[in-house]
Amino acid sequence: MTKTLAQKTIMGTCENMAEAGIDAISLTAVERIAQRRLRQRHALIIGLRVLVLMVVLGGWEIGGPTKWIDPFFFSMPSLIFQQIVDWFLNGTSQGPLLVQVWVTLEETFLGFLIGSVGGIVCGVVLGRNKLLSDVFSLYIQIANSIPRVVLGSVFVIALGLGMASKVALAVVMVFFVVFGNAFQGVREADRYMIANAQILGASRRQLTTSVVIPSALSWILASLHVSFGFALVGAVVGEFLGSKQGIGLLISTAQGAFNASGVFAAMIVLAVVALTADYLLTTLERRLLKWRPAAF
């Protein structure tokens, strides 16, 4: 009887192992199929994007000679490409193109850095202090309701045509975006985690640095994608209003000369800069938020 029981046990174990083997093979096959479909979908998305771009550019290019689109006002892709090549090879009226890009990038990064740090600090401080948030909330709402682009003229008058006025406008554009997310992220911190940390004897400073700020990190990093675009807008608008160098000045000069190709060429350069910065920020966010579950 004992032998029969042992035989049954061994047979059951073998059956379980066989079933486990079949399941493992099935899971491997399913995973392989899923990966192949993901690659196919990724290739399809890229192909459709290229197709849409070709249709738009092709229609735009054909629309000029056929008079569907007036090239004087809207230019053509070929003329815009020629303008970019000419800027790279011969420079712009303000100097080499890369110098103009560097000036705008410098203003953008300074405004982005100062505005982000200021927004994070103020958001965390006011989010953690109910009295301060009640006192300053009215003034923040008033300041946020003012069209910030209008302040560009004030900064140009007060700070001149140099870099300071552009950086100041970029700071103002960035500050309120980052501040709002940091403030809300602090307010949305997990109360149970805060209570547990307090039970363990954490000080207020330890609560802020070890619990609240990590909880708000997703909110803060999400705002950085948007705020860099606002910083770039602030720098370009400031250059457009009055500057000695920069992409905004290129746009202003091209507009004054009724050079539509120059305006679109400068816009393309700005788009490349913005996409590159967004890619870098996305990479940084993934590295800092490895613990976060992947989005479906």
Image: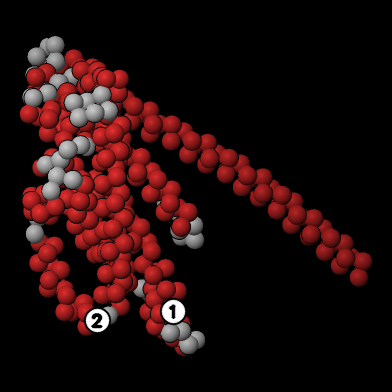
Residue 21 drawn at (x, y percent): 71, 49
- Of the residues under marks 2 and 1, which one precedes in the sequence? 2
Q: In this view, does 138 lie to the left or right of 245?
A: left
Dot 2: element? helix
Question: Looking at numbered disc 1 in the image, what kind of residue is underneath it?
Answer: Gln
Dot 1: element? helix
Question: Looking at numbered disc 2 in the image, what kind of residue is underneath it?
Answer: Lys
Q: How crowded is mark 2: few (under 14 residues within 10 Å), some or many (20 or more)?
A: few
Q: Is the residue under label 1 in contact with that under label 2 (CB below 8 Å)? A: no
Q: As displayed, is residue 106 above or below residue 39? A: below
Rendered residue at 42%/73% (across/down): 209
Rendered residue at 14%/52% (across/down): 159
Q: Quadrant of residue 86?
A: top left
Q: Disc 2 designates what residue?
A: 130
Residue 108 visible in the displayed image: yes
Q: Depth check: 66 or 159 in front?
A: 159
Q: Depth check: 163 or 186 in front?
A: 163
Residue 139 drawn at (x, y percent): 12, 71
Q: Disc 1 designates what residue?
A: 206
Residue 293 visible in the displayed image: no
